[in-house]
Amino acid sequence: MGDEYTDSFAPSNLPDVDSGYLTFFLFTFPAGAIADMVDRRRLLCIMNPWLAIIAAGLAALVWVKFVNPYVILAAVFLLGVACAINAPAWTAIIPEVVTKEELPAAITLGGLQLNISGIIGPSIGGMLLPVFGANVVFAINAFCFLFVIWALLRWQKPIEPSERPAEGFFESFASAIRYARITPAIRVVAFVDFCLGSSSP
């Protein structure tokens, strides 16, 4: 089964898999607004099972031989949405997990982990794919999310009353757009991300 499906996941057989990157870009600003409005721990406890279910679903679909480039494209879109909603909340909880003294090191470590995992993860997946097959790789991916869910469930978040009046979704979203519009560095990063996400390989 591994040899049979290895070629099915070649980039030439996938219709514009960069849609996941573009989806992430388009949903990031609304996701940031949502992360400011709701309990972030609860939001993460929803998004990570979502990611696990998608990975497990792909494993099952490959196992029953019901997979094609369009199924992969739909999964990439759903993964992009989930990752876009997950990312702002994940970043925002760092100050709640570590002390003020540990915060700079934690932010640096988080960025380093993100960059390293973006290299090591696909490399490990690429080595496992021809040996065990796509269904096993997706199953391992789904299993890994269980550790994140377990950690989130064990985390006892301190409850601190907010002194700011609660913003609605549109007010928070407008504030994010306004901040991006008046901050040159954010505009440059957003433009580069949009170009990378909308370009086809």
Image: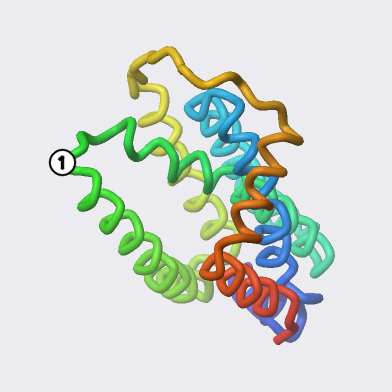
Quarter-wise, where is residue 76 in the image? bottom right
* Element type where label 1 sits in the image: loop
Residue 106, position as x, y percentages in the image: 25, 49
The one of 3 and 143 positioned closer to us in this rendering? 143
Residue 65 location in percent, x, y?
A: 76, 59
Which residue is painted at 18% across and 43% down in the image?
102
Name the residue furthest left. Answer: 101
Circle 1: residue type: Glu
108 relative position to 177: left or right: left
Density class for disc 1 (Cα within 10 Å; few <14, some 14-19, many ≥20) is few
Quadrant holding the N terminus? bottom right
Q: Position of residue 34 (x, y in %)?
A: 64, 35
Q: Residue at x 54, y 38 (%)?
A: 48
Q: Which residue is mark 1?
A: 101
Q: Is residue 137 above or below residue 166?
A: below
Q: Nearer the viewer, residue 190 or 122?
A: 190
